[in-house]
Amino acid sequence: MNAPVHHQTLVTPAHPKALASGQFKVTARDVDVYYGEKQAIKDLSIDIPDRSVSAFIGPSGCGKSTFLRCINRMNDTIPTCRVTGDIKVDGNDIYDPNIDVVQLRAKVGMVFQKPNPFPKSIYENVAYGPRIHGLATNKTELDEIVEKSLRKAGLWEEVKDRLQHPGTGLSGGQQQRLCIARAIAVNPEVILMDEPCSALDPIATARIEELIDELRQNYCIVIVTHSMQQAARVSQLTAFFHLGTLVEYGDTDEMFTAPQEKRTQDYITGRFG
Amino acid sequence: MSDHIVKSYDEDLSQLKTMLAQMGGLVEQQLDDAIDALTRRDTALADRVIQNDERVDVLEHQIEEKAILTIAKRQPVARDLREIMVAIRMASDLERMGDLAKNTAKRTHAMSDQLPRKLTAGVTRMGRLAQVELKNILDAYSRSDAEMAMEVWRSDEELDALYNSIFRELLTYMMEDPRNISICTHLLFAAKNMERIGDHATNIAENIHYLVNGKPLGEGRPKKDVTSAMRIGLEETDDR
């Protein structure tokens, strides 16, 4: 089988940009994930820098989404799922039994493959999170949060006159931006995106990509994508997963021009088989 | 390297390589004919070289088109992308080599039949060396052999050194008899053409290195052509 990725290969010479930033937002050490008997992630270690976009790529079933979902403990909802090893956000162990998972998921937000707005108004979709987390003391403050979040998500101008309309009435791309606004509204620090554009047309995809590029000024973004070109376009770092292992994690520019691992090369050039 | 899942992608890339091999072969022939024409003062052969240059140009355009189309269709990355970039650059180097062969052939017309053989001997020697470089670099490309490419890259020093001595030699002939000046100037340009062909071969060598290793060649090539600062003037001859 494949050799496990050792720690010394994590910060390879291939990714000086991550080194230069010096600081890592998310760190994982020796992570194993099982679904029942089946091992989905094998001995994975990674350091993800803040204020950058890291793209996870790899064939279906390689473990990239599984690992993404570990970062905000979304896998807790799967009864047979077992996670071992260390995953830290800002140096805090997120699998510590004392941690408040609801708080964690506010700090580590998530955007899914299919836009999934609540069956409520556009306003309520964004206001819901801040309200339950007690981020606003009155209506004016809540209005401000909603506007700010929608602006950051690049959706404000399109929806400001119909905030009370149902979120599900928006186009697919608008719905996805609404979901991003909803994630942003609770002041996250990390945003996880699981194939956020796979259900969108090229124009809506371009808008989301532009948005991701803006958001990285303030957030640590991790995106799972099946589109290699998207990974090349939006990310600064790319991680290639295969058969549950992290094969290579490095500077995106280098990954797409001269990857170090043959398996990475074969995958991104469409030679896997 | 293993095959692409999409077979037609492999065909695109192999077609590109085939076209380059074809273009390389044509340039080799052109260079060989140009040197022969000059050496034998064969103006008919020279004219054929001049005419055939268009075929080289056409091939360059075809390669460029194929490369651009492949980029548009496949969005190549990593080694595939380097293959295509190198093909474009190499086609342009080969096209320049073709031009230099043509220019050399043109100068055949300026040579008179009574030209002493010793005058052209040096240029012929350079031509043969340039031919070897071209042949080896084309082999290195078709085998994707970076080490072989580096040998060509290093061997170009020899051609530079030969050029320096021919430069000196031709200047001496010109000083001996001003009636030689016209012909020797043509021969000087022809020699310079051969030296430039060697330089293009080293460009291709650098591209093969990049293709195989994914990194540009770091060190600069030791340039041994010193003629740009060379003087054989009156003051020197006076000293003798």
Image: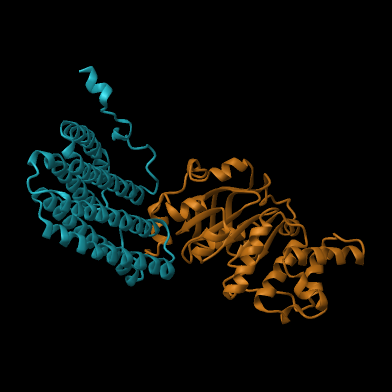
Chain colours: A orange, B cyan
Q: Position of residue A36 (x, y in %)?
A: 53, 63
Of residues A55 and B83, the one nearer the viewer is: B83
Can you say whether B116 is above or below A149 in the image?
above
Q: Number of callouts in the render?
A: 0
State left or right for residue B46 relative to residue A203.
Answer: left
Of residues A117 and B100, the one nearer the viewer is: B100
Q: Position of residue A249 (x, y in %)?
A: 50, 50
Q: Position of residue A252 (x, y in %)?
A: 51, 53
Q: Position of residue B60 (x, y in %)?
A: 30, 63
Asked whether residue B14 appears in the rendered view, the answer is no
Residue shown at 64%/56% (left/top)? A221
Residue shown at 26%/61% (left/top)? B20
Q: Hey, which quadrant is residue A166 in on the image?
A: bottom right
Of residues A244 and B182, the one nearer the viewer is: B182
Where is the N terminus of chain B found, in terms of image quarters? bottom left
Can you say whether B180 is above or below B74 in the image?
above
Q: Hey, which quadrant is residue A158 in on the image?
A: bottom right
Can you say whether B214 is above or below A141 in the image?
above
Asked whether residue B146 appears in the rendered view, the answer is yes
Residue shown at 78%/69% (left/top)? A126
Where is the C terminus of chain B found, in terms of image quarters? top left
State left or right for residue A81 relative to residue A128.
Answer: left
